[in-house]
């Protein structure tokens, strides 16, 4: 069969790969189009295969070298596809070539027929198109939630010290854990007027963030203020002349000596994925008049340097970094060192407070603090039954963890059955009725929580609900305020906007006057204090957004996702990417409300990428629990068991009146499990 690629096929290939953030040259487009024809795989399938291959193999650029490995990875996918598509009959396949020499006219007609048949096979065939052709396509059976395998299996674990899992007890005398906002956080607590920010105001927000981060980076890597031309000097007595390598200088000023500049990473192309050729460093308006210069990272990609001596980097648009190098022309900086931000300060605790939290009779009483975190969607794409959520709630009612952190979307606006807005549900009597988004939440989330507490009113488990920009019944804006029950009377028996969470608070304890909160509605993002721990949470898929725009080199195998998560802490922001990804809905006027007030002990960043739990920056554990559902089948969730410190260590620290870090990396166990 001819493998000549048609212009339309090439265009489809280019568009499909662009949709996953991959730029392909004309020659590679032709080769990929030929693969599409040979393997009977659509351009979109090939693009998705490249995205999976790039994340698995930590490859960011599709070129002649990476194309060979990518082509090899398609063998399994092609074999599966060929098993589904059966061409001509076996009798015709066994028949040898004709002994009659074809005439030129017959050869031309045969070529045209082959090209026409090839184009029809690439397109999605209809039943009428297949009626007259000897092509049989066996439909692929989509796995369903009830047919899932390996239920409860652990897919990933962080447990360097072999700690045990937390075990619930029916006669537990401990009181409920303390759950509240971090006192230093400035996240939104109520709805606000959004998306009315002028261009001047947006520019000023970006400028303020750049100047603030410049001060933080210079404070962490040098001291001593100076004027605009030389902003700061390192704490070195020799830093008084232009030949000192520790001189801080504005972006875009020609210097013959080694200097350090602080700026924002930008993409010169304004669209497409960041790469080595399009890297730009933008200075502040205050110190650099907004100058942009090319960032030359040749020193990091020198082929003559041994692999173990190569320096790595990971950059993305919006990242604020310090660059050390030489900018002799004022237009290009030859970088020799990168500082990818500076983390916020970590919190210290008084030893007596830690002893009380971890060994107090009414606190943890020497037992682990158990946290479960899960992320929506909570129902599969083919129904609104919320079976996965019901199953995980049954598991929670059995295990009785201290805190459950649930990240949206709870009512996913992308759900095909909700997308058109015609919501038809079935009530308890089996009657169909029109429902609102709030009623979907009421019936499938609030009533499930209420039933749990009705069955066991003494259960001390608390729920933290984090909204998502994909939730259909809340404002799609980032930062996102907490859920609010905005009620509006329609008739005497029904209220619009009623989420039903107040029924959860009263379930099983209607006679009690003083009630502790069972459900905490918080913002997206949020920084929480759970007992002595600081926990940062965002439901936006910032890992996927950054990974789609990131440019890196020489990263150790298997560390790319951890490095991206580390950027959030080093940039002191729950969403440092700018320009934001499509659908992120950033309101720049509220940029200070998605900042990270301190380095969290646990950072929860749900993503559709592969789930993981890894330590970063010595004092933080990053957890991606994954999504509870994947299309029509089940996904994953995470359990976090934080064990207390050794009592003797705390008692000795109390006698010395010491302050201590939480030491989370040495006393936590994280298991990511299948639903």
Image (cartoon, helix red, strand yellow):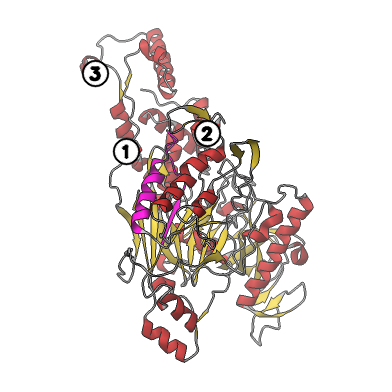
Q: Position of residue 471 (x, y in %)?
A: 55, 43
Residue at x 39% of width, y 23% of height = 2
Label 2 sits on residue: 418
Q: Quadrant of residue 355?
A: bottom left
Of the numbered discs 2 and 1, the one sitting upstream in the chain is 1
**Is residue 644 depicted above or below 375 in this figure?**
below
What residue would you read off at disc 3?
Answer: 93
Q: CA distance from mark 2 to mark 3?
A: 48 Å
Residue 215 in the image: state x and y as whole percent: 68, 72
User: Neighbour class for label 2 at 10 Å: few (<14), some, many (≥20)?
Assistant: some
Q: Which residues are magenta?
A: 371-399
Please say if the residues under marks 2 and 1 sit with CB atoms less than 8 Å apart. no
Q: Residue at x 69, y 68 (%)?
A: 212
Q: Is residue 630 magenta?
A: no
Residue 383 forms part of the magenta stretch: yes
The image quarter in which residue 456 lies: bottom left
Q: Position of residue 378 (x, y in %)?
A: 44, 44
Image quadrant where one finds the N terminus:
top left
User: Do the residues under discs 3 and 1 have CB atoms within 8 angstroms?
Assistant: no
Which residue was labeled with disc 1?
146
Q: Earlier in the sequence, mark 3 or mark 1?
A: 3
Number of the front mark, 2 or 3: 2
Does 602 sit left or right of 132 as displayed?
right
Who's the residue at 70% across and 51% down the image? Answer: 192
């Amino acid at each position: 069969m001819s493998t000549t690629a048609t212009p339309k096929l090439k265009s489809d290939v280019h568009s499909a790969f662009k949709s996953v953030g991959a730029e392909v040259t004309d020659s590679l487009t032709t080769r990929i189009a030929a693969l599409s024809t040979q393997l009977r795989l659509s351009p979109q399938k090939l693009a998705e295969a490249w995205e999976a291959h790039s994340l698995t193999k930590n490859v960011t650029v599709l070129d002649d070298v990476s194309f060979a490995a990518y082509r090899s990875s398609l063998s399994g996918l092609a074999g599966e596809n060929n098993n589904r598509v059966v061409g001509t009959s076996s009798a015709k396949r066994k028949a040898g070539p004709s002994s009659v020499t074809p005439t030129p006219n017959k050869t031309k007609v045969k070529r045209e027929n082959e090209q026409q048949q090839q184009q029809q096979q690439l397109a999605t065939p209809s039943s009428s198109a297949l009626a007259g052709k000897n092509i049989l396509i066996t439909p692929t059976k989509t796995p369903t939630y009830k047919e899932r395998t390996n239920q409860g299996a652990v897919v990933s674990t962080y447990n360097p010290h072999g700690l045990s899992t937390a075990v619930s007890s029916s006669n537990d005398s401990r009181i409920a854990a303390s759950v509240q906002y971090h006192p230093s956080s400035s996240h939104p607590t109520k709805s606000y007027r959004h998306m009315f920010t002028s261009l001047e105001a947006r520019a000023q927000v970006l400028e303020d963030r750049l100047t603030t981060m410049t001060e933080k980076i210079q404070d962490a890597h040098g001291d001593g203020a100076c004027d605009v031309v030389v902003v700061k000097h390192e704490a070195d007595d020799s830093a008084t002349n232009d030949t000192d390598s520790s001189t801080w200088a504005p972006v875009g000023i020609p210097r013959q000596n080694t200097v350090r500049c602080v700026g924002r990473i930008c993409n010169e192309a304004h669209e497409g994925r960041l790469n080595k050729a399009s890297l730009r460093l933008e200075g502040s308006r205050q110190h650099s008049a907004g100058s942009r210069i090319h960032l030359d990272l040749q020193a990091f990609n020198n082929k003559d340097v041994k692999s173990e001596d190569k320096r790595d980097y990971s950059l993305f648009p919006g990242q604020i970094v310090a660059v050390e190098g030489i900018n002799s022309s004022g237009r290009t900086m030859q970088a020799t060192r990168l500082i990818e931000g500076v983390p916020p300060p970590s919190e210290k605790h008084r030893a007596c407070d830690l002893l009380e939290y971890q060994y107090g009779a009414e606190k943890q009483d020497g037992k682990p603090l158990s946290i479960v975190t899960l992320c929506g969607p909570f129902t599969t794409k083919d129904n609104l039954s919320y079976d996965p959520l019901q199953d995980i709630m049954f598991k929670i009612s059995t295990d009785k963890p201290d805190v459950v952190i649930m990240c949206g979307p709870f009512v996913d606006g992308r759900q095909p059955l909700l997308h058109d807005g015609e919501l038809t549900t079935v009530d308890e009597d089996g009657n169909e009725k029109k429902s609102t988004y709030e009623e979907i939440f009421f019936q499938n989330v609030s009533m499930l929580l209420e039933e749990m507490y009705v069955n066991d009113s003494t259960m001390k488990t608390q729920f933290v609900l984090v909204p998502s920009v994909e939730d259909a019944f809340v404002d799609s804006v980032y930062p996102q305020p907490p859920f609010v029950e905005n009620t509006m009377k329609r008739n005497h028996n029904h209220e619009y906007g009623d989420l039903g969470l107040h029924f959860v608070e009263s379930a099983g304890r209607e006679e009690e006057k003083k009630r502790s909160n069972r459900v905490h509605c918080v913002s997206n993002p949020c920084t929480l204090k759970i007992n002595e721990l600081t926990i940062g949470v965002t439901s936006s898929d910032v890992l996927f957004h950054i990974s789609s725009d990131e440019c890196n080199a020489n990263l150790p195998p298997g560390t790319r996702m951890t490095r991206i998560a580390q950027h959030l802490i080093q940039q002191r922001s729950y969403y440092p990417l700018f320009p934001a990804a499509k659908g992120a809905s950033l309101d720049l006027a509220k940029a200070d409300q998605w900042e990270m007030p301190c380095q969290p002990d646990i950072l929860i960043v749900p993503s559709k990428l592969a789930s993981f739990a890894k330590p970063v920056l010595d004092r933080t554990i990053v957890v991606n629990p994954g999504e509870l559902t994947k299309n029509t089948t089940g996904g994953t969730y995470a359990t976090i068991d934080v064990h207390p410190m050794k009592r003797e260590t705390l008692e000795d620290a109390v006698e010395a009146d010491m302050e201590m870090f939480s030491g989370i990396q040495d006393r936590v166990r994280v298991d990511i499990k299948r639903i």
